[in-house]
Every structure is written in structure tokens, then in C-alpha cells.
Amino acid sequence: MAEFGKKPTRIIAIANQKGGVGKTTTAINLATAMAATKKTVLLIDLDPQGNASTGLGIPRDARDVNSYHVLIGEAGLAETTHDTEIPGLKVVPSGVDLSGAEIELVDMERREVRLAEALKPALGAYDYVLIDCPPSLNLLTLNALVAAHSVMVPLQCEFFALEGISHLVKTIEAIRKGFNPTLELQGIVLTMFDKRNNLTEQVAADVREFFGEKVYKTVIPRNVRISEAPSYGKPVLIYDHKCAGSEAYIHLAAEVLKRELASGKGV
């Protein structure tokens, strides 16, 4: 569904129906690392919990007009976009109203393409649009996947990881067939990686065997600084740019951008 404007804006949805896998952390820090490479980035917080907004320092009282109003057509992107302390990175925050959007969208016309249509003004204005999806395969996530060119899946290195991701891959395929024929799996990033844990190594090996080159070489380690940063309203790259978590997200951004360029679709 995504179109192209003055520059080939790329829209990447960051999704996993399982919570607690580092999805929002990846959205925040990947966006920050991309902006650090002089890319212009818009992060859409589409999770009613609003953690991406909090993690980028957007106070609750500044979110009266948010991604909910964009989805239901009561506000445009320009009215909802906030600057962040990171040059080149802007955010459309989430608000508590978004938790009711699922019910409201059910009766709306063209309910699955509302985000895609709302994003048209952003096409050509940014190099990348990242969408932080809620931890479920609902109408909000459907809107994100219909709007996106590709999907990045953060995957926690734990026992049930492959079972969950196989369900998501089937959903991506269904959306490709029914709504968005250009949608592709951008890549899988292994998160909360603990090399001291044998299970972590085994899950990583299984995922790489199953998905091959779709799995990024970069892994995101378990790192206390990553966990601390959101409470200060900062990405870990700003909170502690020398920690292992920051270095991992810098490497991930480089790998994502390299893949994008190699595909001939990136900027």
C-alpha cells in the first residue's frame, strides 16, 4: 500500500504478537541509531501502552492528540508529530485513547488502510518511518502491516520463540495476499541474548537454521543499561552510548541500512 514521494521513504513495521521481546526497545534505539547516521526518521507509536513515546521523552500531558486521532481521521500527521532530543528523529506518540481504537475501527470503512492513507504526507518527507506495533495481531497491527514495505521481528531467545514467529510469518503471508502484495519480512533480530545460557545459543541456532539470511548477524544482549534507559525518557544510545546495548543497536542499524541499500530499495 505504501507509495513514494520525493525520496523513497521506507516504512518498516516492528512487530511480534508476543510481549516482552524487546520490540519497543528495538523501535526506539533502531530509530535513534538510524538518525545518528543522518537519516530522517519518523517513529509511529501504535501501541496503546505508549512505551515508545515514554522512551523518547514525550510526557503524558503532551499526548492529547496522538496516533489514535490519526487513525480515526481526526488529526493529521503534522498535528501529532513531536520533535525529540535526537536530531533527525520525530515521533507520533500513542495515548490511552488508542486502546479503544480496535472497537471503533471495526465499523469504519477501509478500516485496514487508514494508517497507510494517513502516512501519505510523510512519504518523501522522511528516509524511514518505523512503526512500533502492539503485542498482538489486531486491527492496529493489521494497519501497520498494510502500510509497511517490510516487517522487522524482534525475537527473544527462549523456548517458544519459533512457535510464535511461525504464526506471525503466516499472518504476513495472508496480508501479502489480501492487502499488501509488496510486504516482505525485512529481518529477524535476536534480543535478550545471553551467551552464558545454553538455551539461548540453541534457540539462536534453530532460528538461523530455519530462517537463514533473514536473521540479522547482530544480536541484542541482555544489558541492564538498556533496561534503565526508558525510565529516564532516553534511548540507551543517549543514556549510555558506550554500553554493550548501545553498540549492538548501532551495529543493527548499520546492518539494516546495508541490507536496504543492497536490495536497491533503501536510501
Image (cartoon, rainbow, N blue to C red):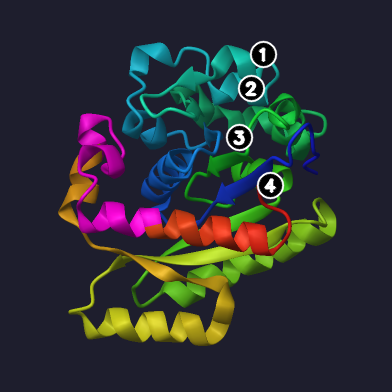
For mark 3, what is the residue?
A: 102
Residues marked 2 and 1 touching at CB (< 8 Å) = yes
The residue sitting at 48% across, 44% down in the picture is 34
State which tag comes first along the sequence, 4 or 1.
Answer: 1
Task: Judge left or right: residue 30 versus residue 75.
Answer: left
Q: Is residue 43 above or below residue 133?
A: above
Q: How far separated are the C-alphas under marks 2 and 4?
A: 16 Å
Residue found farthest to the front: 38
State which tag comes first along the sequence, 2 or 4.
Answer: 2
Q: Which residue type does callout 3 highlight?
A: Glu
Residues marked 2 and 4 touching at CB (< 8 Å) = no
Q: How far separated are the C-alphas under marks 2 and 3?
A: 13 Å
Q: How far separated are the C-alphas under marks 4 and 3?
A: 19 Å
Chain part drawn in magenta: 230-250
Q: Which residue type does callout 2 highlight?
A: Val
Q: Using a 10 Å C-alpha cutoff, classify the residue at mark 1 as few (fewer than 14 neighbours), some (14 to 19) or many (20 or more).
A: few
Q: For mark 3, give the secondary structure.
A: helix
Q: Nearer the viewer, mark 2 or mark 4?
A: 4
Q: Where, quadrant-wise, is the N terminus in this rendering?
A: top right
The residue sitting at 33% across, 18% down in the picture is 59
For mark 2, what is the residue?
A: 70
Q: How far separated are the C-alphas under marks 2 and 1?
A: 6 Å
Q: Using a 10 Å C-alpha cutoff, classify the residue at mark 2 as few (fewer than 14 neighbours), some (14 to 19) or many (20 or more).
A: many
Q: Nearer the viewer, mark 4 or mark 3?
A: 4
The circle drawn on residue 148 is 4
In the rendered image, residue 229, in percent from the top left (x then y), is placed at 22, 40
Task: Judge left or right: residue 253 versus residue 56.
Answer: right
State which tag comes first along the sequence, 3 or 1.
Answer: 1
